Amino acid sequence: MRLPLSIAIIACSLAHADETESVSPQTRFSSKEMGLRLRVQDGGWAGAPRESIETVLYSVADELLSRLPTKLASTIVIIHTDSNPVAMYERGPAGEYQIRLHASGENWHLYAYEFAHELCHILSNYDENIDATTIKHNQWFEETLCETASLFVLKSLANTWESSPPEPKWSEAARKLRRFFDHLISESHRQLPAQTPLVSWLHENEDRLRNDPLYAK
């Protein structure tokens, strides 16, 4: 997301990160136990094992769903795409959600970043706005929240895997997750201009955000 507003929101989430991360992974309900089923389809992952991809994606879902009051007892099919990641409005033949991810190979930080964003769209009930006549003036805010979810997951999952990885090999991936998080939040386009309060920045950019929701990405 090319939007400084995301930093303001993620800052609020991370201000309480120590509280949420103090919950041991062993004491949380996993997303599987909550009824979530992920099915990664073969093809396009540049040799990354499907089982490893599912490990990452379930871990992402655990970080988000264990902190939300509602469950997501649904099936999500994950397909590779050479285009941009997206949560499809169209359901599969059995009513399953469909998410397309661009990540490939063993770039686990990209899988986590992309999947957290698209899973957030599903959790936001995005498919209630399929009607082409629906006015989506505030779609930019949903994009902001989903970017927030991605940033939060990168940091939180790094902490989880450093202390309790699914397998020993994932402890190295934890360091890459943390480095990617640090890189993203340090990018200049994610910072408010100097001496510019958030309310002033939003006032100046709100019309553009309403007219072009993808400006928030």
Image (cartoon, helix red, strand yellow):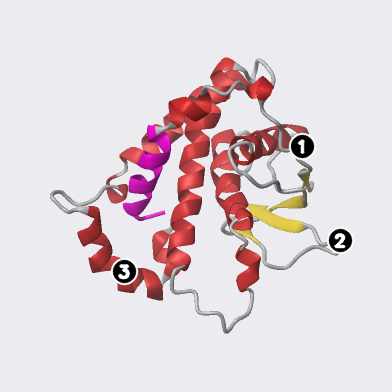
Give the spatial CA distance, label 2 vs label 1.
19 Å
Q: Which three-letter amino acid code belongs to the residue tagged 2?
A: Ala
Q: Nearer the viewer, mark 2 or mark 1?
A: 1
Magenta-highlighted residues: 1-15
* Nearer to the camera, 182 or 44: 182
Give the residue drawn at x 17%, y 53%: 196
x, y (%) of residue 151? 46, 41
* Nearer to the camera, 96 or 184: 96
Where is the N terminus found, in terms of image quarters? bottom left
Q: Name the residue at the right extreme.
A: 94
Overall secondary structure of the magenta section:
helix
Give the spatial CA distance, label 1 vs label 3.
39 Å
Question: For residue 206, which numbered disc appears in the image?
Answer: 3
Q: Which three-letter amino acid code belongs to the residue tagged 3?
A: Glu
Q: Residues within 10 Å of mark 2 (few under 14, many from 20)?
A: few
Disc 1 designates what residue? Answer: 32
Disc 2 designates what residue? Answer: 94
Where is the C terminus found, in terms of image quarters? bottom left
Question: CB of mark 3 within 8 Å of CB of mark 2?
Answer: no
